[in-house]
Amino acid sequence: MKQYQVAFVGNPNVGKSAWINALSNAHFQVGNWPGVTVEKKEAIVTWGDAQYHFIDLPGCYSLETIGNEERITTQFLKEAHVDIIVNVLDATNLSRNLLLTLSLRELQLPMLLLFNFMDEVEKQHIHIDMNALQRRLQIPILPYSALDKKHYGEVKKAIIQMTKQKVCYYPLLEKQELQVYIQLFERIEKAVPKDSVYEEDELHRLCMRFIHKDAATWRQLKNWGIQEIELQAFAQRLDDKTMQQHRYEIIHSFMKYVKQDEHQRYAISRRIDRMILHPYLGMPIFLAIFTIVLLFVFQASAPWTTFIDYLIHDILYKYLAVGISFLPIAVQKLLLDGILAGVGGVLVFLPLMAFLYMVLSILEESGYMSRIAFLLDRAMRSFHLSGKSFVSLLLGFGCNVPAIYSTRTLDNEKQKKMCALLIPFMSCGARLPIYVLFAAAFFPHKAGLMIVTMYALGVFLALILAFVYSRFTAFKEDAIFILELPPYRLPKLRMVFAKVVLEVKGYIKKATGIVLWAMVILWGLSYFPNGQVSTSYLATISQKVAPLFEPLGFGNRWECVAALPGGIIAKETIVGYFETLSHPLKEEQTQQSLQPLEDMAAIGKHAQTALTDSIFAFIRPQIRLKPDNDAQVSMIQSLWSDEHANLRAFCFMVYVLLSIPCIMTLQAMYHEYGWKLMSISIGSMLLIPYLVSLLIFQIFSLF
């Protein structure tokens, strides 16, 4: 079967993914480009007797290798075999988009131009002379929106036709420069060895590579007998700088084919920006919007999280327990408490991830995400971070896992890595039950203040570390990035839903790696040798390790040390561990009975409750915490009774705040940035919590 490679290229946010999604029915494969964290999307479709491999290249504004996005796109187009380039343009902003088009044109590859957002062109009363532009560019133009299904067939037909054509695009130059180019072309054509065959498009590519000062091309031309002095003469008369300047002049000439009222076009966006980007009101408006957004994400997803947790731990657990009841107890516990718990730990995040991706997609599609970065950029630059990085850090207060994945939207590789290292210092929601339990036990009249102190301390240390990390070459970024504010758009629900499905699939694929193995290992340490947590290998090891933590205040109780490893699975397990100690585990002797009809009815009832609670959670918000009943509080209070009891409890809370994040966060960091960055994070969060807790206890215990 014949195979063709189709590269979709364009500026950021012009709709490349939307077109691939439309043409391939969302059969995306998602990963990362080798060696970098830039997302790689591709799809394969079969049309007739041929396969078409769609590659969604990273959005860029030029083919200059400045950042990872430009570098990846340029290298792929110049080094990989590409049968056709589909250049997607924002038809409402052609002056910006055509610069990349002219650079792509010089590659002498078959091209097709898709003018996206044509529905907005009509609304903004913009008139584009497509025929005139098509004649000047010598490239077919299809003026269709990715949301308009009736034109998908025409785009498909055009792609099939272009893959079978051979093209030769003549350079668009002024008369004087064109004469120099013709002379260069003829000189190279004359120098071609007689035993070699070069087509016209290949000669044009050689000319362009020579103009762009490609060293290999210069050597090749000298080997063909063209003297260095001749090459230098041509280079002085026609160089890359001249070509770049002419691109802008050509674009300016193209704009005479576009009739638009600039004032009317941006009138709505400008009116909104006067308020959204107001010097004094902009920040309060942002804080209000983002508070509402976060409230919606975490409150609306909580009922569905509870529902999935019910399905796994109440329904699936029960039926699996009966199904494997003939197996030895240890194997049953492994399957139920190890493997099933590991899968459940991944799946319960799905509602949160889905709602989060939905909100992020809406903010991105509407154009407000760029405004957030614009508002916060100046303040965050003081800490060597960008405005966009604040969004990722803020998401970390809810859950570190989606916050790590959200760093892929940042501008450059170094910013992404540094922000990913800082996110685990943001106190996620899973740590909150620990704060509540210990604050209720030791600071009953100042519980709220202690919890706020934990959040503030995490932010303070993250900003300090930003200064420290920025001193290292691996994280220092001095480049200046120009931020473009797109016009406000009403998000299309179909596109938002497609993005959510794609991201959730990618999350499941990425998040189900080493988690299960980690769960099995930790389960084994907590279960053997006799099935009791308090006498397990983990407890024994903790008793021997506890003296290392005595200088931190809480190491005089091995229970606190034993609770910490479980926090690597999920921070909530620290509370669960203390609860297990207060209620020793007993083997169930009774045989569970299965009632499928009743369970189906119960599942339906829970689903209905989840739907109702999710809808009304935004109207009746409430913070849901782990139980802090009197029995738990009493057990925690019994840990310490000396004069430094409160200080010991505070140091334990600080250690939990700054310690290694959960396995899901580490998994996300590994998949996005590899072993090296994950190792740096683990090393930092082993050293920093120890030092900070040590200083706090040793200093304040003197008073």
Image (cartoon, grey):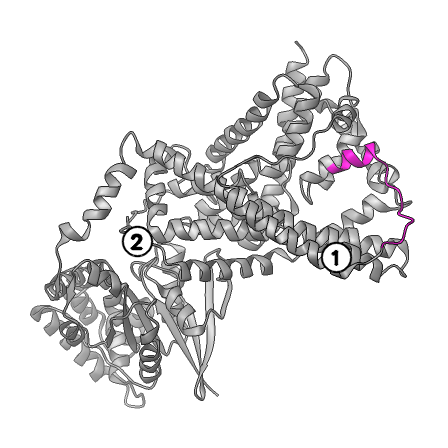
Residue 514 is at least partly visible in this image: no
How far across and down, in percent of the image, does residue 177 sit? 11, 69
Q: Amino acid at mark 2?
A: Arg
How far across and down, in percent of the image, does residue 594 sit? 81, 58
Q: Residue at x 83, y 37 (%)?
A: 539
Q: Residue furthest top?
A: 703
Q: Residue at x 32, y 41 (%)?
A: 374
Q: Residue furthest left?
A: 175
Give neighbour class at mark 2: few <14, some 14-19, many 20+ (Cα, 10 Å).
some
Residue nearest the observer in this picture, 600 or 85: 600
Q: Residue at x 39, y 58 (%)?
A: 69
Residue nearest the observer in this picture, 315 or 665: 315
696 up-or-down from 624: above or below: above
Magenta highlight on residue 109? no
The residue that mark 2 highlights is 489
Residue 308 is at least partly visible in this image: yes
The residue that mark 1 highlights is 598
Question: Callout 1: helix, strand or loop?
Answer: helix
Instruction: Name the quadrant of the C terminus.
Output: top right
The magenta stretch is 576-592
